[in-house]
Image (cartoon, grey):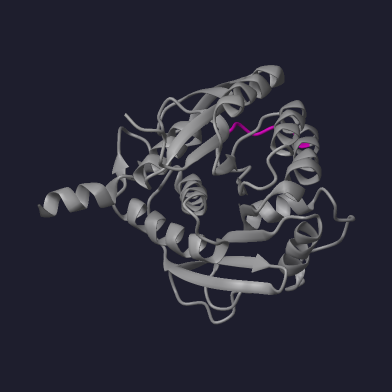
Amino acid sequence: MQNQTSPLILSFGAADPAGATGVQADLAAFSALSCTGLAVTTALLIGDSARVEDLQDIDPDWVADQARVVLEDMTMAAFKVGGITNVEQVAAVAEILSDYPDAPLILDPFSSRLPSLSDDDAEELLTAIRQLLVPQATLLMLSQVELGRLAETWREPGDGGENEDTLESDVEHLLALGCEFVLVTGTPAGSPHGENAAPNTLANTLFGADGVISHDAWQHLAGPFIGAGGTLSAALTAFMARGADVPEAVAAAQEYTVGALAHAQRYGMGKFVPNRFFHLQSAADMQ
């Protein structure tokens, strides 16, 4: 026997019975990338590979206790925060993570397929995430649409709109809060604004303190997929837990995610689920 040698990662998120999103999906990606995952469950979902029918919140004290017991026993190489369902959970998770500022934190608050909240509840939740978790994040990952939704919590009425600088100004606002990097996914390829975009391609743009760090275009795969974004953020977390810096982790995680989507599987009558172990299976097939 030997002591633990692979990096440990603690993931906060919902428990998805289909294993397509949430903590089960994170643990699979971590394992595929030579890390050991541990999970703090924030919600129990009822759903299949097509849709979520219902959700049960986990009491915020239970969320905190799950994390603290594990953290008193083990040292984490990185943290990932996915779906959180209410303001009290945000406060509990933020308080815990504040004790571990040296470990990378990947924040992907839209990664779980949580049912839509009312407009008031959603704004309150997103405001809490912006105020309490974004300042602690090493990297915040969200789509261009999700960025716009988050930005509604600080923009004045009438701000934004068609101004081509809106995306950059929204990212600058988040970076000014203390977040080190922002990865905006699913933008048109070409420039970060989408000019001269190649057909049927999408891009992921990484921003840091000095502006755009990378703008990577990828061929759009038809799908439909479930769990694609969560696969990317989990892979990012794993590569950073293994010591990669953020640009290296983003590049490697994108390559891994494209492979997982290219080998995705349909479990039932719903959407395609990324095959997080595709590279291991491909190697086995070659032997």
Residue 55 lies in quadrant: top right
Task: Please determine whether, in this image, residue 171 is positioned above or below residue 213.
Answer: above
Q: Where is residue 199 drawn, in percent x and y?
A: 44, 74
- Would residue 53 be visible to someone looking at this image? yes
Residue at the right extreme of this rendering: 156
Residue at the left extreme of this rendering: 287
On screen, residue 5 versus residue 177, left or right, reads: left
Q: Nearer the viewer, residue 137 or 164?
A: 137
Residue 6 lies in quadrant: top left
Q: Where is residue 216 drawn, in percent x and y?
A: 50, 70
Q: Where is residue 109 drawn, in percent x and y?
A: 63, 42
Q: Nearer the viewer, residue 216 or 153?
A: 216
Q: Residue at 73%, 47% (x, y): give it.
A: 136
Q: Residue at 38%, 56% (x, y): give it.
A: 256
Residue 172 lies in quadrant: bottom right
Residue at the bottom extreme of this rendering: 196
- Would residue 162 be visible to someone looking at this image? no
Task: Please determine whether, in this image, residue 9 is positioned above or below residue 191.
Answer: above
Q: How many marks?
A: 0
On screen, residue 17 versus residue 264, left or right, reads: right
| Prevailing secondary structure of the magenta residues | loop
Task: Please determine whether, in this image, residue 101 is positioned above or below residue 179.
Answer: above
Placement of the N terminus among the 4 image quadrants? top left
Q: Residue at 60%, 66% (x, y): give it.
A: 206
Task: Please determine whether, in this image, residue 226 is positioned above or below residue 179.
Answer: above
Q: Residue at 77%, 54% (x, y): give it.
A: 151
Q: Is residue 152 magenta?
A: no
Q: Is residue 116 magenta?
A: yes
Q: Nearer the viewer, residue 261 or 2?
A: 2
- Numbered range of the magenta stretch: 114-119
